Image: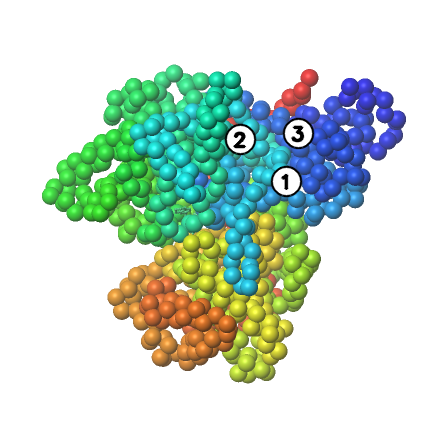
Amino acid sequence: MRSEKAAGQPQGSEPPAFQDLPEHYGCGPIRFRGSHDGLYERHLLFDNVVAPEDADSRERYEAIARSVRDVLSQRWQLTEQTYRRENPKRIYYLSMEFLIGRSLSNNILNLRLDPLARRLFDQEHLDETAILAEEPDAGLGNGGLGRLAACFLDSMATMQLPAMGYGLRYEYGIFKQTIVDGWQREQPDNWLRRPDPWEIARPEDAVEIDLGCSFEVRGGNLRVAVGMPSRLLGMPYDRPIVGYGGRTINTLRLWAAATPQTFDFQAFSAGEFVSALAQRLTAETVTRVLYPDDSTSMGQGLRFVQEYFLVACSLADLIRRFRATNSDWQLLSDKVAIQLNDTHPSLAVAELMRILLDEAELAWDEAWDITRRCLAYTNHTLLPEALEKWPLRWFELMLPRQLEIILEIDRRLRDEILARFPGDQGRVERASLIERGGERLVRMANLAIVGSHSTNGVAEIHSRLLRETTVRDLAEIFPGRFNNKTNGVTPRRWLLLSNPPLARCITEAVGDGWVTDLAELERMKPLVDDSGFVDSVRRAKRMAKLGFAEWLQASAGIVVDPDAIFDSQIKRIHEYKRQLLNALRIATLYNRIRENPNLDIAPRTFFFSGKAAPAYHVAKLIIKFLNNLAGTIDADPVVRGRLKVVFLPDYCVSLAERLIPASDVSNQISTAGYEASGTSNMKFMMNGALTIGTRDGATIEMAEAAGEENFFLFGLTADEVAGSRGWYSPLWHYDNEPETRAVLDLILSGHFCRYDPDVVDALRNILLTSGDVFRHLADLTSYLEADQRLQALYGDPSAWTRKALLNIANSGRFSSDRTIGEYAAEIWNAGPCPPPPERTRPR
Ligand code: 26V
């Protein structure tokens, strides 16, 4: 039918976009040559039954996305076929979060289809921005940890590693944030409301999971029905992960929970029918929603079930794949590397042991050896309240066999410690998997460390603090297991895709090798004194700022001045990230202008964006204060036009992609010792923003790479923060530093919060009464000094751009390709497995 129609087309009609597909995609020129309706028109017609001119943006988005999927599907299955044939060691990345963002433009770019897409948009006069905006921003994560997982998938596919991501297909991702009267409101993110062209259901790969109890939902809570074992069905949905160049296409497999029962409608009485359907709803609640709190492990039963569900489904799936080509269990660790993204999937230790003991029927020592060789654990936080500890009672109820295994691991661990440190009962208790005292708890970090061969932190300082403080006893017992893997970000999404003007300018100067080898950016260094090149970098920044300002006005009606310094702090709202310190800085500048209206100060727009965990009261209060600050400044005729504060609602991947390229200044101002790594810091650096920041996380390594003279570092070091614990007093700063006192007096007078005395009370409490735990006042003065230097530099545009350029040129180390290279070589012992380059054409 297709070929008949194609053959019937008049000669010389305009060829379709997507028809000249690159050879290796295999499904292009042969199939559709000569037809007047390319893939895009075909999808509109056959999927939506609509003519191109009548289609709305959503239909156009779907048709384009499906066309792109057509192009990648052959390489996708070829990639999996290659892995099956070559049987390499496979890498499995287990994560409760993948903060994917939008896929269409990223997939077009990685497939190198951008010229074809451009032609389609131009020829059909399509509104590209409107069409791309139809795709929901897949927010299956809270922040850095989830976005890191997504960057890692991109790097692993680009480096042609045989890797797969495993996660959960939450029906609701991270909530949508709106701001009402300055306060955060949360709305559900129903991102799967419409059919998602990127996901493929794989019912043939569904798995069944056994639990030691049943559940019912009462009043929104999951209640356990004790002593009634039950089963859950894990339904896999696959998403393509396109490596740059489109040769390797890996898979992200997300599990949705369902009930395994199939209904025999005849046999069911009316009552059973209803309760059976209700059971189905209960099962589906397991993957209903992403937990939106990344600061406290609140011990929610549903979260515990989610974690086990991810682990059980993923292990069953990867073991089945292993068994399809390997009969010898001893080979498991030669064929499988499993990376645990934080402790969230660390039940994998007990579950893999259960499989090896009970299903493979191996002896304990063998099973233990294999488990440890397969698993590796990444820690992402030192905050004690975020470290997961689950009540032992829940294991008794839901996972009795896994509990037995955990207790046996613990017994052996205790024996081992006592043998090596005779009489050191304190060490035994601190290192144990079980916390005693009150209710017995299972320490998930200890389980992950003991049950794996590698524990890594995500920046040098973080890995050191992890070893020296958080899990010191275990690090002394197993020193060889601890290592560092400094985070990175993918330069495809975060430079090539998000910042076309800068990407073009770099490529014109040094070629395009940087896209897959970011260290190539160093070749820009000799050009630092080439005024033509420096000018072109400056123009690129200007274009990004103009583009952002235009978008902001069109989408939110907010007008910002592109001649102002764009100064950004975008991340989750947390006390330790110190958005409040930034607010103190802004309020001080405001005060200075009010006191001296003739003050010579460069116009500046301060952007904030970020979500607060719905139950994190103080974080929500900080958002309110930032909005009040913005309102007060806007209303002040002396300051208006010189300083402006904008709180951008609903921070997400797409917003970051727009704001980061447009920013001149990146604020990375966490209390030293608290931010494990940070990753937006790296994105800003490679987009030519200058960093004002503390010596924390990966910012330290960034400054080292760029040269401290090209950074604006300030504040206490982590050791100084720790050392001040016994004697620090915010009052000292209030009493002895005039500007600190002035700004606090202004804030506490209610100047910014005329109608919100509760906000003022809370700020007084945080900054003074409760001892300023996060050292805002200790760092304010040096922050302002660094800021002064930064402002002075902005007055000299070529000196500014020179530093920006050196930052870009030295950002190569912060590509996630470098990070993944280190994981592959030092933890996974795995290498690339490229699918054959030849073209295989469908017959
Ligand atoms: C913790 C919890 C606690 C229990 C409930 C749900 C939940 C969800 C997420 C988390 C993770 C918090 C840790 C985290 O996101 N760490 C961030 O990881 C980034 C990537 O390594 C790193 O750049 C950031 O510095 C670090 O804060």
User: Would you call the spot at circle 3 few (<14 residues within 10 Å), some (14-19), or many (20 or more)?
Assistant: some
Amino acid under label 1?
Leu
Amino acid under label 3?
Asp
Please give the residue where the numbered disc 3 appears in the rendered image. 70
Please give the residue where the numbered disc 1 appears in the rendered image. 104
Looking at marks 3 and 1 on the same chain, the residue that comes earlier in the sequence is marked by 3
Which residue is farthest front?
A: 270
Residue appearing at x 32%, y 49% in the figure:
466
Can I make out residue 161 in this image? no
Quadrant containing the C terminus in the rendered view = top right
Residue 282, x across and y down, in percent: 45, 34
Between 765 and 224, the one nearer to me in the picture:
224
Specify the label residue 517 is tagged with: none
User: Would you call the spot at circle 1 few (<14 residues within 10 Å), some (14-19), or many (20 or more)?
Assistant: many
Q: Is residue 330 left or right of residue 269?
A: left
Residue 302: name its quadrant. top left
Location of residue 5 with respect to 728 vertically, above or below? above
Please give the residue where the numbered disc 2 appears in the rendered image. 237
Disc 3 Cβ-to-ligand 1 distance below 8 Å: no
Residue 767, x across and y down, in percent: 38, 69
